[in-house]
């Protein structure tokens, strides 16, 4: 098998782990997509800029990480707009990808994202790092990835960061490579 998969990390930038993630990806000559929380980016702009300089792709993960399905449409839209504006200012590019917190979505959420030119991206494989999965369990989850699929990880998880070299080694052994997420399809494709 050959192809591309997307490694995605939610909830950053995180002062404890983002720098280590960026270093690990650089050392491994790999890229990933970071779904960034706006208020975290405002608090830790240097970490976000460092990720951008390392060639990581930046996506929108709302301003405060709410369940968007519980908000009014104007409030949900504001969560996305505020984050878009800040990420554009800090990263120098306009994010085209969006991940709803908790994967909570629906027609109103997708419509709010579409109005901003954002493609909603969920995941095919959940590492369950958010539930306390160990590094070994995260690596085993990633071993289920196939061409075009997206893996959910979190910048806030030390076990996920520790798993990255082993995940990449397994992917290489199976002819898979870390790629970008295509804004048109939400699937992993070759990086550009």
Image (spheres, grey):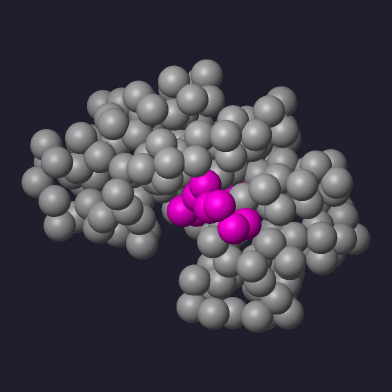
Q: Position of residue 155 (x, y in %)?
A: 57, 56
Picture layout, residue 159 above or below residue 32: below
Looking at the image, can residue 57 be seen? Answer: no
Looking at the image, which residue sits at the far right?
173
Q: Residue 154 in magenta?
A: no
Q: Position of residue 161 (x, y in %)?
A: 68, 62
In what quadrant of the picture does the C terminus appear? top right
**Magenta region, residue range:** 5-17
Magenta span: helix, strand or loop, mainly? strand
Q: Position of residue 96 (x, y in %)?
A: 45, 29
Side of 87 relative to 169 (left or right): left
- Identity of the residue drawn at 78% across and 51% down: 24
Q: Residue 14 in magenta?
A: yes
In what quadrant of the picture does the N terminus appear? bottom right
- Identity of the residue drawn at 58% across and 39% down: 47
- Identity of the residue drawn at 50% across and 50% down: 12
Q: Position of residue 80 (x, y in %)?
A: 29, 36
Looking at the image, can residue 135 be seen? Answer: yes
Nearer to us in this view, 29 or 5: 29
Please identify the quarter of the rendering in which residue 16 is found. bottom right
Side of 47 relative to 184 (left or right): right
- Identity of the residue drawn at 69% across and 52% down: 21
Picture layout, residue 136 above or below residue 142: below
Please identify the quarter of the rendering in which residue 187 is found. top right
Picture layout, residue 23 above or below residue 58: below
């Amino acid at each position: 098998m050959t192809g591309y998969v997307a490694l995605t990390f939610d909830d950053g930038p995180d002062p404890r782990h983002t720098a280590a993630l960026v270093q690990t990806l650089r050392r491994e000559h790999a890229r990933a997509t970071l779904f960034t929380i706006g208020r975290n980016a405002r608090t830790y702009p240097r970490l976000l800029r460092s990720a951008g300089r390392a060639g990581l792709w930046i996506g929108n993960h709302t301003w405060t990480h709410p369940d968007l399905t519980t908000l009014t449409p104007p409030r949900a839209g504001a969560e996305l707009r505020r984050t878009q504006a800040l990420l554009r200012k800090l990263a120098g590019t306009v994010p085209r990808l969006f991940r709803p917190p908790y994967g909570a979505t629906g027609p109103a959420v997708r419509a709010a994202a579409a109005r901003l030119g954002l493609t909603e991206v969920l995941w095919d494989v959940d590492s369950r790092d958010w539930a306390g999965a160990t590094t070994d369990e995260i690596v085993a989850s990633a071993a289920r990835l196939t061409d075009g699929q997206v893996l959910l990880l979190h910048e806030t998880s030390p076990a996920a960061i520790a798993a990255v070299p082993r995940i990449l080694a397994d992917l290489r052994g199976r002819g898979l490579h870390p790629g970008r997420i295509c804004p048109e399809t939400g699937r992993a494709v070759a990086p550009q």
